[in-house]
Amino acid sequence: MGHHRAEYLGKQSGSLLSGVVVNFPGGTSSNLVDNCPCQTIINDAWTFGRTSAVETIGATAFLLNSGQNYIGFRFLNEATGQYNYGWARISLSAGYGTQPRTLLEYAYENNGGPIAVGLLSCVPEPSTTALLCVLAAGALGVRLWRRGREDSRRWRDLLQTSARGAA
């Protein structure tokens, strides 16, 4: 990814209404490119800006030394006359202005419809319900294991008592 890929997407696009998502909730400014969380739906509900400045603090800050940086974008499809929505995953090095930076993957809908960020690469986080179910299953397993040990002791004691009584 070149030195100012966000600038290219934000400033050099063919339509003044094309650009990158700049108003994601949790961002510190409505003028900075946001690092969009996985599964964010990119559609016409967002504000798209033409800037190269990125979020560096807060919930939507870009992550240095990471390939988990996602931008949402839209561009005018000249063949259809409608906007296409997409996302790109980029890798950043140790500094915002340092190399290497790499475009890892991207996707866009060519029918003008919305698209979920990271549809190809995001691993969804487990839900609260799923985590509670795993914890409950673990607790049940521990209880059954303890019960099995208690039952084993009872049988052993019973057999020893029987053996003493027979002797």
Image: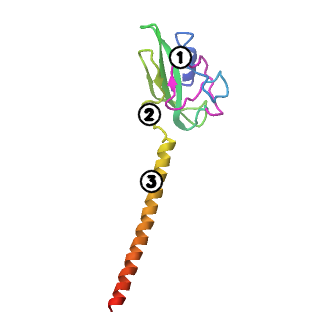
Determine contact: label 1, label 2, CB under 8 Å: no
| Rendering coords of residue 103 (x, y %) | 48, 28
Q: Is residue 102 left or right of residue 98?
A: left
Circle 1 residue: 44
Disc 2, SS: loop
Q: Amino acid at mark 2?
A: Ser
Neighbourhood count class around disc 2 (C-alpha, 10 Å): few under 14, some 14–19, many 20 upward:
few
Residue marked by disc 3: 137
Return the disc, 1 or 3, that comes first in the chain's sequence: 1
**Mark with earlier residue (1, 2):** 1
Q: According to the image, label 2 marks what residue?
A: 121
Q: Is residue 13 above or below residue 58?
A: above
Q: Residue at x 54, y 18 (%)?
A: 9
Mark 2 and mark 3: span between their CA atoms? Answer: 29 Å
- In the image, residue 35 sits, relative to residue 74, either above or below, namely below
Mark 1 or mark 2, which is nearer to you? 1
Disc with the residue nearer the chain's start (2 vs 3): 2
| Residue type of the residue flagged with mark 1 | Asp
Residue 110 on the magenta segment: no
Residue at position x 46%, y 48% from top? 133
- Secondary structure type for disc 1: loop
Read off the magenta span. 33-59
Secondary structure that dominates the magenta span: loop
| Amino acid type for the residue under numbered disc 3 | Ala
Viewer-closest of 138 and 90: 138
Q: Residue at x 40, y 68 (%)?
A: 148
